[in-house]
Each structure stands twice: as structure tokens, then as C-alpha cells.
Amino acid sequence: MTRVAFLLLIEDDEAVRTALEMSLTRQGHRVVTAATGEDGLKLLREQRPDLIVLDVMLPGIDGFEVCRRIRRTDQLPIILLTARSDDIDVVVGLESGADDYVVKPVQGRVLDARIRAVMRRGERESNDSATFGSIVIDRAAMTVTKNGADLQLTPTELRLLLELSRRPGQALSRQQLLRLVWEHDYLGDSRLVDACVQRLRAKVEDVPSSPKLIRTVRGVGYRLDAPA
Amino acid sequence: MSDASDGRVRGWLRALLRLTSLRLRLVTVFALVALVAAVSVSGIAYWLNRDAVLTRAQNTALRDFRKSLGDRATTLTESPMCNDLHSMAAGVAENTLDYQVVLIDEASDGQICQAESDPGRFNLDMVPASLIEAVHDRRDGDGSAEYHLYWQRISLDGDPFLIGGTRVIGGGPTGYMLASLSPEQDDLNSLAWSLGIATALAVVGSVLLAQAAATMVLRPVQRLSDAAQRLGEGKLDTRLEVRGADELAELTRTFNSSAASLEQRMQDLSARESASRQFVADMSHELRTPMTAITAMTEVLEDEVDNLDPMIAPAVQLVVSETRRLNDLVENLMEVTRFDAGTARMVLDDVDIADQVTACIDARAWLDAVEVNADRGIIAELDPRRLDVILANLIGNALKHGGSPVRVTVREEQTAARGGHDVLVEVADQGPGIPDAVLPHVFDRFYKASASRPRSDGSGLGLSIAMENAHLHGGDIDVHNAPGGGAVFTLRLPRQARLPEHEAAGAEHRGGGTAAGGAG
């Protein structure tokens, strides 16, 4: 993608905000910033950014709540900026709908790479379509319909479904999926995959608790099956 | 049987022995005292009774015999006929005391006549010779009586009898009597039985009493012992109820106050310790926000370094590199505080060890300095990030202190103890090895081999963190010097990392549908 990404950075600490804004701007992004979650939500409605970089520890409504509120209406990518790599933060963040996360102190280049990877997920690459039971994936329009109704998927969820649907019946390991979808290195956090699979199941499966489409393959990872 | 259960059985046995020995001693002493007292009392009672009963019976019989014999002898003629003697014997034997009589005299026809009241039950043959001799022994001098009445107790066919004899004064006949002592014997026997039973009852009673006393004394002791054990197991809130005002109550009070002060001390210590841990955790956490800003800015500075004044550029480069070091240090400190607080968690995934090793080396551009000898296909369930931390620290350490080429070998080993497989990663360097004095300390935090050693680039936490990570997986790291020189670090990890119990419950379940918590 050659066009400049338009980012919304929500971060309460002024020094961090300024430094990250400067760093990201130098990487070629257009950045608007907000100091609180409320301001961020307002800016989101007014300016329609492509992606949100969201700090978890915010005064007022915290990052998780901001994330949940965004997900009610929008499917744009969210990258969490967490000050603690403590697991509970990451898990809660992923469950509230974030696409990826980076741990402070973050290097500008790493954040930039994550942003570019997330942005790439929305790109179309082929023009065919595929049908799995009641799910129809249109790769030309980058849309997914279930029983004819459009499904609202985030770019990450869509990319995960596309990668799985490209190899139907074949199990993909979490590390493989991390490389394919998240473009992480060999140390990707497998919980990103688990969280995203859960969100995807909630949207595409008839009964999310007993998935028929996206199956768990014990000891390996996940597999997309065409329902019998 | 495991050592633990073995030890428990031994502990019980010891406790039992200790308990019974004290109890046994008490019971034995009580029983002995009761036995001695009861036996001596019974013995004396029996002896006195026996004497009294026998003497009375004897005296009655003998007196009656003497009187009866005397009375009838006066009616006898000087030279009585044998018939007269017979009727006299029958007459004397006709008494309420039921004794038999034999009379002997020289009859008028010059023959010795023996007259028995009942020849079947008593005749002269039954009289002991010594008694006959004593009866015929004539006493002179005192004038009261020429012949005395003599008696003896004998046993006929197992039954006790009293046998007595005398000569009637003035040349009268000689008379013997035989009285059965069986009724008296029976009385005495039943008395002996009663006394025996009473003694047995006394002993049994004393044993029961001793048991009760032992229980009374030992129960508080047992309670104290149990409580002390609980205290030793770390349950510092163990207290005992104080009952009564005896020595044991005093002991209980002492125990309680000791336990209380121990608990207080432990609380103080752990509060202080957790406060200092919390401080380190908070501090490292607080450092992160400014570090984020600084890191982002130093990157900007780094990009501009070529455009800067050559006088300023080295300063900027120093700031950049030191910021990176500071970043690593803060990261490591955070990691250490997580280990100390027990909040370090694992994110398990199935990974190919060989791939991980290669990727780790590749990511750090170590490929030229490291020989990897690893076959693909050894899959283990572990936390890939933590494995990477371990590998990076071990290999980095080998490169820094040992020198290249560093050899990394991955192999699998069956473990008898765990019944599974272990994955072994050996990191061997070509350096001088580690001095023996240093060897036990290589995993210590901030340990520096010698003060004179040049400042290393590491944080001083690397190997310690590697070890903690290995422990988290249920594995271990071993270090030794190879015979040919060079240090060898051996990482041993179980193929299936076992989550600690407190974590297992909260761990993500990968098997079935992780259905909970869909898109919010």
C-alpha cells in the first residue's frame, strides 16, 4: 500500500504521545492524537482514521473500554499499546477486540512494522470467491456473507478467514498463522490467533461453542472445513 | 513406595512408640502397685483367716473328743471286755462334730482289743507312727497328767483331716479320733477365690485408671505435638485452647505466645519482602513510560546521526546505545520481579525445537559463529518466547565469554523418572571454561566472576532469567566444563511443559472449543 496511513494515537502521557507522534510521522504516517479515551472516540467519529494506536492505561475510560466501544460500530484495526506485558492485560485487550499489541517501551520501527502489517490485511489479492456452507467469501469485493447477509469483519479477522479458506481441510499451526496474517517473526504470541479465532467463530459459526467451520486441531492449530 | 510415604509411616511408628511407651510405663507402674498391694492384703487376710478357722475347728473337735472320752472312761471297768470298748467307741463317735474313733486297750482276756467306730473310715493303720509314739510318751513331773492329747493334720486321698490321740488317765484305753477338715478347706478355698478375684479386679481397675490418667495427661501433650507440627508446616495461625490451670495449660500458653510472636515476625518479614518486591516492580513499571518516550526519540536521533555535527554525533550514538542497554535492563528487571512474585506465565504452543534454535540464531545474526546440530521434527509444547530467551542468553553468553565457534546440539532423551521424553539443548563453547570457584554461581543474579573483569554488556541477569524460565517449564539448566576445554550448558526441558497448579486452572485451554468470550 502506497497511500499514507491515517492514524489516531490515543495516549495520555504527553512525552510518549509527542515522541510516538514524531516517530510515526517520520515513518510516513499521518497522525492525529488524543489524550483521553473520550477525546479519541470523538476524533474517531469526526476524522475517520484508518487505524487506531491505543494506550491501555488511560484516565477516565480505559483502553479496553475504548476498544469495546469502537468495536460496537467500527471494524477498523486497533493496535494496543500496553505498559505491562502481564498476560491478563494482553488477554483482556485481545478479547475486547484489538488486532495486535505492542509492549512499551516500544521501538518506533516495530510499531511501524505492525501498523503496515495490519494495513496490508485489507488489501485484495485475487478475484475469486469461495463458499463454505452458509458462508460465502468474495475475495474480489473483500466481503463475507452468511446466509446472504454481510458479516462485519475486521481486516485481521477477514485475513485470517482468507488464509484458512485458501487451504481448506489443511491444519495451520498458530505460528504459521502468525506469520501469514500478523506477519510476526518466529516469536509471535499465539494468543493473538486464539483470540482472533474466537471472535471469528462468534461471527461465522452457527453455534460458536461447537464450531463446525473453524476446527481446532489438537497439538497443531486450526483448520477450515467445509461443512458436510 | 515413595520416600515421602515411607517417611510418614516411620513418623507414625515413632509417634506410636513414643505414645505407647509413656502410656505403657504409666499402666505398668499402676498395675504393679495395685498387684503388690492387693496380693499382700489378700495374702495376710487369707493367712489370718486360715489360722483362725482351722484352730477353732480343731479345738472344738479335740475338746469334745477329750471330754467324751473322759466321761465314758469312768464308766468303764478295770479290765473291760472288747465288746465294752466297741460300744464305748460307738458312743464317743456319736457326736455332732462327725469324727471317727478308734479305742485300744488290753482286754480282760489279755488280748489287745481294737475297737473302731467305723472300721471302713478309720482304723489304727491310718494313725501316723510319730503320733502313736507321742501319745505313749509318758510325762512325769508336773503331776497334772501323765499323758497329753496330741494332734496332727494329715491328708488322706487329697482331703485334709485332723487326727488326734491320747491315753485315758489311770491306765484307761488309748483313743484316737479322725475329724474331716473338708468344710473348713472349702470355706478357705472359696475365700481364696474371692481374694484372687478381688486382686484381679483391683489390677484391672488400676490398669483402667492408669489408661484414663494417661489419656488425660497425654491428650493435651498430643494436641501440643499436633499443633507444633502444624506450626512447623507453616500454618503459623495455629493456636491451642488453654484449659485449666495446670502445668500443661502453662505449656499451652507458652506455645500460643511463641506461635503468635513467630507469626508476627513472619508477617513482618514477608510484608517487608513483598514491599521491597512491589517497589522493584513498581519502579520498573514506572520506568517504562519515560523509556517509551526516550526510545522513540533516540530512534529519531539515530536516523539523523549522519547529519549531525561530528562533535555531537558520538554523544548521540552513546545515548542511543545506552538507552538500548537501559531498556534491556528494565525489561530484565521486570521479568525478574515477575518470577519473584510468581506471576510469570507461560503461553504454550507446539514448536519445532530445531526451527526455534535456527530462528533465534538467525534473528541475532549469529549464524557465522554458531554451529547448529539439530534435526527437525523434535516437537515440544512450550512457551516459544521463553525458549528464545533461554537460547539467546545461553548462546550469547557462550559467544561473549567462550568464543566461537559455539556448538548447539539438540537431542531427545527418554526419562525413566517422568515416563516421558526430555528435550536437551547443549551449548558448548571453545573458551577456557569456567573456573571451579565460579561454576556454582554462574546463575546468580548480577554475579561477576571477578572484580577485575571488564564490564560486560549484559545486565547480569541473563543466565538467572534463563534458569528461571527453564524451571517454569519444569526443566533445568546444567553447566560443566568439557574434558577438552570449554564450558557446556545443557538445557533440559520436558516435551510437555507442566503448568504449575495455580496456573493450570487459568491457562488457556487449547483442546476443545475455546468458546467463551466471543467478539465483544
Image (cartoon, coloured by chain):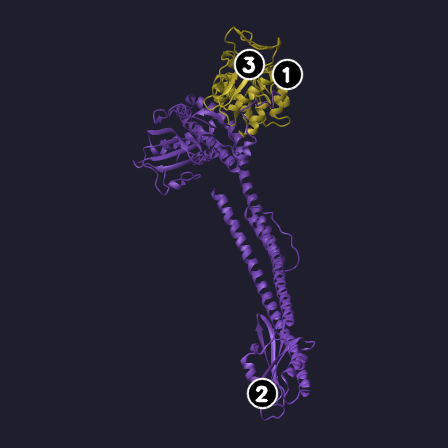
Chain colours: A yellow, B purple
- Marker disc for residue A199: none
Q: In this view of the protein, which residue sits in the foreground, B81 or A169? A: B81
Q: Earlier in the sequence, mark 3 or mark 1?
A: 1
A202 on left or right of A103 = right
Rendering coords of residue A29 (x, y %) = 52, 16
- Marker disc for residue A158: 3
Residue A36 seen from this side: no
- Marker disc for residue A73: 1
Disc 1 with disc 2 on a shared chain? no
Q: Which amino acid, mark 3?
A: Leu
Badges 3 and 1: C-beta atoms under 8 Å apart? no
> Cα distance, mark 1 to mark 2?
159 Å
Badges 1 and 2: C-beta atoms under 8 Å apart? no
Residue found at the very far left of the displayed protein: B484
* Pointer 1 local density, CA inside 10 Å: few below 14, some 14–19, many at least 20: few
Q: Secondary structure at mark 3?
A: helix
Q: Which amino acid, mark 1?
A: Thr
Q: In this view of the protein, which residue sits in the foreground, B91 or B292? A: B91
Residue denoted by label 2: B110
Residue drawn at 58 percent across, 60 percent down: B27
In the rendered structure, the residue with mark 3 lies on which chain? A
